[in-house]
Amino acid sequence: MNKLLIEFLEMLDFSRTEAEELYPDWAATIDLLGLEEQDVRFAKEEWIPQHWDISIKGVRLCIGAYIRELIEIGKIKKYKERGIKVIYGISPSQPPCYSAIKIAGGEKVAVMYPDFLLSIVLGGFFNKLSLFTEDDSLLSERCRHCALNRTRINSSVRQVIPEPDVIWTWKLFCDEAAKTEELIQCLTDNHWDYIASGIPHDACLGEHEDKDPERITYLGNQFREGHRQIEEITGIEIQNKHVYAAIKEYANYTRKLDRLTRMVTNTDPQPVGGNELALFGTTISLIFNSGLTRFEEAIDSMIEEVAVRIQEGKGILPKGSPRMGCHFTPICVPWVDRLFRQNGVAVSFSSHVSFFKHEFLPFDYADPYQMLAQLWLRHPNSVNLGYHIELMVEMLKEYDIDAMLYGFFSFDRWLGSYQSMTLKEIEEQTGVRHFYIEGDFWEDRNYKKTDRKGRIESIAYFLKSNKLFTDANYSD
């Protein structure tokens, strides 16, 4: 038994007994991914302690929950041998749709987002996503193809991620994901069923899509039809009660996440960093075959510990330091948050995985699929540019920040375009300064720390100078 692998789990609050029980599957997963002993040692002794505040129990538990789900990837072949149906999802998508399948099927089905999970764990905790992005023969990074899709291709072709019974892919944001799925099937001898769901991006500029019954009915029926096809392929019956249960589970976690986000972002000094917030926020973009229970335990602990830090006046930077929100703090390249903090700026909430009052209004529909559709169309990133601007302006009114940071999805035709086209208008309407750094959420192969250090230092210098000037004027 490799002592290092046991110690890695114990660092994340696994008990010795639990670590030893998990060891066979944990060691097999490490081998499957191609990680070596020095990679695990580097993650344990350097990368994780440098970029994640593991003095906080909630953070340790949260990272541990991600590791537990990583072990699920190593068990997929065993699941298939036992006749368990395997269903993959991709992001961006509507996670409760998958949760409902897991609730309905229980131990008869395994449901997960393997490529997204690999990207988060290998990039954020090991700095080794290059294991699945270095092969440029399929989707070249020089053509700015998404590293998430490159990870999906390479991990599938190499059989690190075994073929599923069915994959449910989406065209809600990303139009490359479905094409990637087709490419994978062209490159392998194995073929599986896949479902593609989406909605036309044909809403008028400024249209309130979450108030359009025709649009909500259409999208709700896309979700419903996806479940119907899953039933045909797997034999698992998905009833409305399972969808309601999934919505309730999702709502319970998101309300806790909303509380944590507001505690952190609207407190001065800021008690924890943007990496930690995004770590908990990313959970709502995924589905976990191992379940949400441990993430619930982690966020409950996190809320309690943050409350204590607030009471004691402890912060990651001195009171009055500038604070900056981000579209989605790039936790796969966590040095971005660390470098801003070293230069006196606290990265705080991520708008992609945060909420505002509008999103917690009661539903206008009783049908669970229409509920999910309305929930999707209430978020700024899901709608037309005009409504996106309106919703983002409302969101920024609820958070105490000095600036917003964008640019880590510059390769993305949907999110990258949104950010380029809307930042000026949002800045003018809110008075919150907006900054843009050409970068990549998933990896830093094209955007090294040394290349972006000067840009980060310049933004930090501006914000600190502007904060001093503004505070001086207010004091007069």
Image (tube, rainbow, N blue to C red):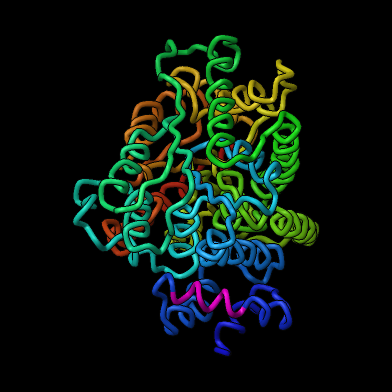
Up the image or down, 304 lies above or below 474; here it is: below
Up the image or down, 463 lies above or below 226; here it is: below
* Residue drawn at point x = 58 percent, y = 56 percent: 83
Judging depth in this view, the residue of 141 and 306 nearest the camera is: 141
Extent of the magenta region: 23-31
Q: Is residue 458 left or right of residue 66?
A: left
Residue 107 drawn at (x, y percent): 68, 54
| Residue 476 in sight in this render | no
Instruction: Give the quadrant of residue 445.
Output: bottom left
The rendered magenta stretch, by its main secondary structure, is classed as helix
* Residue drawn at point x = 56 percent, y = 44 percent: 285
| Residue 50 in sight in this render | yes
Q: Is residue 6 left or right of residue 91?
A: right
* Residue drawn at point x = 45 percent, y = 65 percent: 122
**Magenta-span inclusion, residue 149:** no
Q: How many marks?
A: 0
Image quarter hosting the N terminus:
bottom right
Image quarter hosting the C terminus:
top right
